[in-house]
Every structure is written in structure tokens, then in C-alpha cells.
Image (spheres, rainbow, N blue to C red):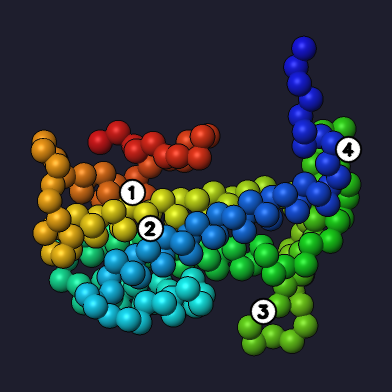
């Protein structure tokens, strides 16, 4: 006998809240990764990194890009790293739309047909809220969560690459039999992977 789907016991509002909560958690992973990269790129002995804990993702991306361009790392790492940081910026903007939109139920779920929602959002330079073109289900929310998870993994690839290529980390002793993982980190930064159901990732075949 199959176990009942726990989600089937949730109301439409609870299902939306659950999906938005997943977006918030995924966004926290992106910010965590950005803070790690920001710290890895800090000048040795600098004491200015604590402030990174209190700035938004967009500003963190700007600062990480500027630091990466000054770091003197090999060109492929710099270029792929900038791509990973731009992915984080784009995913952050998508997250802002989901979290700050007002969601109002248009039609309730019934007979396997998902609920549909209208959204209202503020737009820079315009007064009043802008309504979505038409009602939708919560799949756009899950798409944003996936974009954030991908961005978090891409930024993580940059963080790991920095620990391999920055001179101050190169001075650390390597274990016997050590081989470079840089090709894997570059693939992550470039987004050449798919998300796995267990929360991890699988690189695309070369």
C-alpha cells in the first residue's frame, strides 16, 4: 500500500508557502556561497570582510566581481567565475520577485488540477502595483528555486577553484597523490551540470 502524499493534506495556501520557503532557503545558500567567495578574495590581513555579513546579494556580487578581477588568477577561472557570479545576481533578482510579490488565489485546486494564483508587484519607476498577465500555478516558484540551487552550486565551484589557484592557498601542503580538481570546478562555474534529486549535482558528460 502506497503512503499518502503529505502535500495532499496541505491547503493551497500552505503549498504556496512551502514552495516560497524553499526559495528562501535556496537563496540563503547563494548568499552563504557569496560570503565565502568574498572572504577568499580578501587581501591577506584585511579586516574589512565582516561587513559582508550585512550586505545584500547584489552588492556582494559586485564586490566579488571587483575582487576577482584584481586577484590575478588565470583567465579561465576569472571568466567562469564571473559567469557564476552573474548567475547568482540573476537568481537573486528572480527570488526578489517571488518573495516580494503579493499572491492572491484565483482558483482553488480541484480533481488534480493545481490552484492558480494572480500576483501583484511593485515596479521601479511606476506608481501602484502591476498585475501578472494571467493566473499561474506555483511552477514558476519551483523554477526560481531551481535557478537558486544552480547558482549556489556555481558559486561553490568558484570558491573551491580559488582555494586551488590563489597563491596563498597554493602554499598549503598537498596530500600525497593530489591531483587538480580544477576541470570539475570550471564545469560547475559554467553551469555544465544538472541538479540531482538528492540535492547534489551531476556533471554533464564531456
* Along the viewing direction, whichever of 133 and 193 lies nearer the viewer: 193
The answer for how far apart the CA atoms under marks 3 and 1 are is: 33 Å
Instruction: Look at the numbered disc 4 and give the secondary structure of its residue.
Output: loop
Which comes before the other along the chain, label 2 or label 4?
4
Q: Position of residue 49 (x, y in %)?
A: 37, 77
| Residue 58 seen in this snapshot | no
Image quadrant where residue 168 sits: bottom left
The answer for how far apart the CA atoms under marks 2 and 4 are is: 40 Å
The residue indicated by pointer 3 is 123
Which comes before the other along the chain, label 4 or label 3?
4
Please report contact status of discs 4 and 3: CB closer than 8 Å, yes or no: no
Please report contact status of discs 2 and 4: CB closer than 8 Å, yes or no: no
Q: Along the horizontal axis of the image, is 169 left or right of 64? A: left
- Which numbered circle lies on residue 188? 1
Front: mark 2 or 4: 2
Instruction: Look at the numbered disc 1 and give the secondary structure of its residue.
Output: helix
* Placement of the C terminus among the 4 image quadrants: top left
Query: Is 7 drawn above or below residue 164 in the view shown?
Result: above
Query: Is 146 drawn above or below residue 203 in the view shown?
Result: below
Please report contact status of discs 3 and 1: CB closer than 8 Å, yes or no: no
The residue indicated by pointer 2 is 155
Front: mark 4 or 1: 1
Instruction: Look at the numbered disc 2 and give the secondary structure of its residue.
Output: helix
The residue indicated by pointer 4 is 110
Q: Residue at x 77, y 47 (%)?
A: 15
Amino acid at each position: 500500500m502506497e503512503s499518502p502524499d503529505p502535500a495532499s493534506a496541505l491547503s493551497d495556501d500552505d503549498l504556496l508557502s512551502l514552495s516560497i520557503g524553499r526559495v528562501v532557503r535556496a537563496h540563503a545558500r547563494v548568499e552563504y556561497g557569496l560570503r565565502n567567495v568574498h572572504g577568499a578574495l580578501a587581501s591577506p590581513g584585511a579586516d574589512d570582510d565582516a561587513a559582508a555579513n550585512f550586505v545584500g546579494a547584489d552588492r556582494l556580487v559586485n564586490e566579488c566581481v571587483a575582487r576577482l578581477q584584481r586577484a590575478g588568477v588565470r583567465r579561465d577561472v576569472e571568466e567562469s567565475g564571473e559567469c557564476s557570479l552573474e548567475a547568482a545576481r540573476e537568481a537573486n533578482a528572480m527570488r526578489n520577485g517571488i518573495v516580494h510579490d503579493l499572491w492572491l488565489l484565483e482558483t482553488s485546486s480541484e480533481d488534480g488540477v493545481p490552484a492558480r494564483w494572480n500576483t501583484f508587484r511593485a515596479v521601479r519607476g511606476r506608481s501602484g502595483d502591476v498585475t501578472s498577465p494571467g493566473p499561474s500555478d506555483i511552477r514558476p516558484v519551483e523554477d526560481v528555486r531551481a535557478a537558486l540551487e544552480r547558482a549556489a552550486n556555481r558559486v561553490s565551484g568558484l570558491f573551491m577553484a580559488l582555494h586551488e589557484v590563489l597563491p596563498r592557498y597554493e602554499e598549503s601542503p598537498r596530500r600525497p597523490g593530489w591531483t587538480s580538481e580544477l576541470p570539475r570546478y570550471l564545469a560547475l562555474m559554467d553551469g555544465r551540470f544538472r541538479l540531482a534529486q538528492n540535492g547534489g549535482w551531476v556533471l554533464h558528460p564531456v
